[in-house]
Amino acid sequence: MGKSLTGKELGQGISQRKDGRYQARFTNRFGKRQTIYGKTLNEIRQKLRTEQYEDEKQINVISSDMTLDEWFEIWMDTCKNNCRDSSRQNYRVSYNRIRNSLGWRKLNGLNLIVLQQAFNELKSDALRRDTKKTLVDMLNKAIDSDLLHKNAAKQINTIVTKDSKPEEPRVLKLEETDLFLEAASHYRYFNEFSLALETGMRIGEIIGLKWSDIDFANRTIYVKRTLVYIICEDKDDPKYGKWRFDFHEPKTDKGRRKIPMTLKAYQILKKQLLWKRGIEAKGHKAPEGFEDLVFTTTKNTPISPRDTTVVMKYISKRIASKEPQFEPLTPHTLRHTFATRCIERGMNPKTLQIILGHSTVHITLNLYCHVTDDTLISEMCKFEAGSKHEPQTSCASAHSVTGVAL
């Protein structure tokens, strides 16, 4: 039993300090000796009851001093230690968007208002959605570690600007594909872009291809890896913190696959083989570990995925200067276009799933198969052709007439 300065008994764990303030101590569920302070006896008793109640209901936390920045580093080193370097880099990019606004705050000070204000400052709803995923996972792990008892990030509103609905992925129409290939033929990465349209491979998978993955005899491409250009996250590596090329295995078993070559794909790779032999004949030696790459720079070095994106922006601008309606595109546009063409031409969705390397056919149909305006018209024409009643004007001819009010 503790006592006051006058010798009066105050209750279990409560005592009065020489400066007149009261204090209470108890051992919490973490085995930590916890001390509480108060100006009056009633105040300290109330605080003690509150702390003991939260401890009993397991809604208290093991530490109240940790900041979000400190927890992020712990979360990265423990919860995300086995992730790829590229994934870890994406987490850092995502977190850095809110680091200045929230990183200095203590975990137990992250309420919804504070979080929402920080997210409102982000440039788009897409960035908010991406950043929220990272923060929610961080704080979930903080709860599991008894650092928090509630995840306020789950209630963050990511719909702030007009881009509340994710944009439909860009798909090239037939005439746009011709425009793109014509413009791209003037650039070094024409073969890579053409192969993407013939196989649906991701650009990282294409620039990560090795000649040992190409079976010309059986006209088959084996997808085994992707090439990335990332900051080294391994603290034991001499290149820690520096940019480097690296090969990554497919994320799923479905990602490791074989793709039959079309005649055009076969011709593209044969052309690339001649080109590669030409730069080797000029004495350009490939870096160690990258000697067998199919696609390289003119110096026989690996290609950065970012460079392909930059080149496609230039190509888009070049086309748009003559065709203003032509919208920007990215390397992934070519994958979406391939998938859409396959469905338009009657390919079995399950077959397309295997070619694209998706884990489920649901992903294939919902994310990579799009309906173009041309498809809408042709499908309605099929419906019309099957009608029992002869229409006055055919679907195809009706769409060939302009300026007619319907």
Image (cartoon, rainbow, N blue to C red):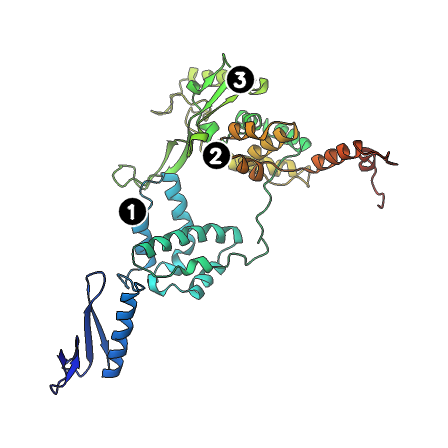
Tell me the mark number nearer the camera, choosing from 2 and 3.
Answer: 2
Secondary structure of the residue carrying tag 1 is helix
Q: Residues within 10 Å of mark 1 (few under 14, many from 20)?
A: few
| Image quarter in which the N terminus is found | bottom left
Residue 206 in picture, x, y percent from top left: 48, 27
At x 59%, y 26%, the residue is 185
Secondary structure of the residue carrying tag 2 is loop
Q: CA distance from mark 1 to mark 3?
A: 47 Å
Q: Amino acid at mark 1?
A: Thr
Q: Which residue was labeled with disc 2?
A: 359
Q: Is residue 22 above or below residue 321?
A: below
Q: Which residue was labeled with disc 3?
A: 271
Q: CA distance from mark 2 to mark 3?
A: 32 Å
Q: Residues within 10 Å of mark 3 (few under 14, many from 20)?
A: few
Given residues 178 and 80, the one toward you in this image is 80
At x 63%, y 41%, the residue is 327
Residue 40 appears in the picture as rendered: no
Secondary structure of the residue carrying tag 3 is helix
Q: Amino acid at mark 3?
A: Lys
| Image quarter in which the C terminus is found | top right
Q: Is residue 186 above or below residue 317?
A: above
At x 46%, y 18%, the residue is 214
Between disc 2 and disc 3, whose residue precedes? 3
Q: Residues within 10 Å of mark 2 (few under 14, many from 20)?
A: some
Q: Looking at this rendering, what residue extends furthest in the bottom direction?
A: 6
